[in-house]
Image: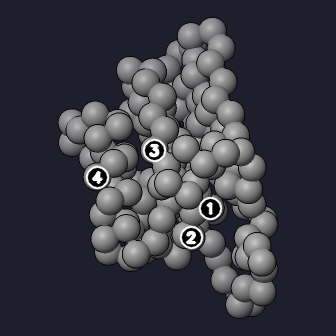
Amino acid sequence: GDNSGGTVGAVARDHAGRFAAATSTGGIVGKRPGRVGDSPIPGAGTWADARVAISATGDGEAILRVALARDIASRVAAGLPLRDAAIVALRDLSRVTSGSAGIIAVDAAGVLGLQLSPTMPIASIVRRGSGESAIIADSLGEPI
């Protein structure tokens, strides 16, 4: 059976170049009382700063363990292109935790990055005006 409540994430860059990220989840069915997932933890499932906005979904414990969103942002801050930063961070997450995840992100150049494990589906990508955004839902869409 399905053990998750579904995750929805969004990232945006506005006309002035400011970033925002949001992640919401239904959580895990039968979770331990008091368990906090990756979505509400800055740096784990969500991150936005002056360079990038990131939203993640997938194995919450793995995402928490490696602080996935902040890991990607740190790699971008060190000069790695967004797509490369996401690929390296997702590979590290898989190697260190045996977990899987997917991310959407937008960087300062306005490049929308979309990196997903083979089992992660995508719901939609939206580009309007000079800003860009993407939406993921881990319980909808087709795997890519």
Q: Is residue 83 shown left or right of residue 58?
A: left
Q: Residues within 10 Å of mark 2 (few under 14, many from 20)?
A: many
Instruction: Please tell me in which quadrant of the rendered image residue 92 appears.
Output: bottom left
Q: What x and y, as percent, mark residue 6? A: 75, 60
Query: Relative to residue 64, is residue 140 depicted above or below?
Result: above
Q: What x and y, as percent, mark residue 27? A: 73, 70
Q: Are marks 1 and 2 in contact (CB under 8 Å)?
A: yes
Q: What x and y, as percent, mark residue 16? A: 53, 15
Q: Residues within 10 Å of mark 3 (few under 14, many from 20)?
A: many
Query: Relative to residue 67, is residue 48 depicted above or below?
Result: above
Identify residue for label 3: 115
Query: Relative to residue 36, is residue 91 depicted above or below?
Result: above
**Total residue callouts:** 4
Residue type of the residue flagged with mark 1 = Ser
Q: Which of disc 2 and disc 3 is earlier in sequence?
A: 2
Identify residue for label 1: 39
Residue type of the residue flagged with mark 4 = Val
Distance CA(mark 3)–CA(mark 1): 17 Å
Answer yes or no: is residue 143 visible.
yes
Tag 3 secondary structure = strand
Q: What x and y, as percent, mark residue 25? A: 73, 61
Identify residue for label 2: 60
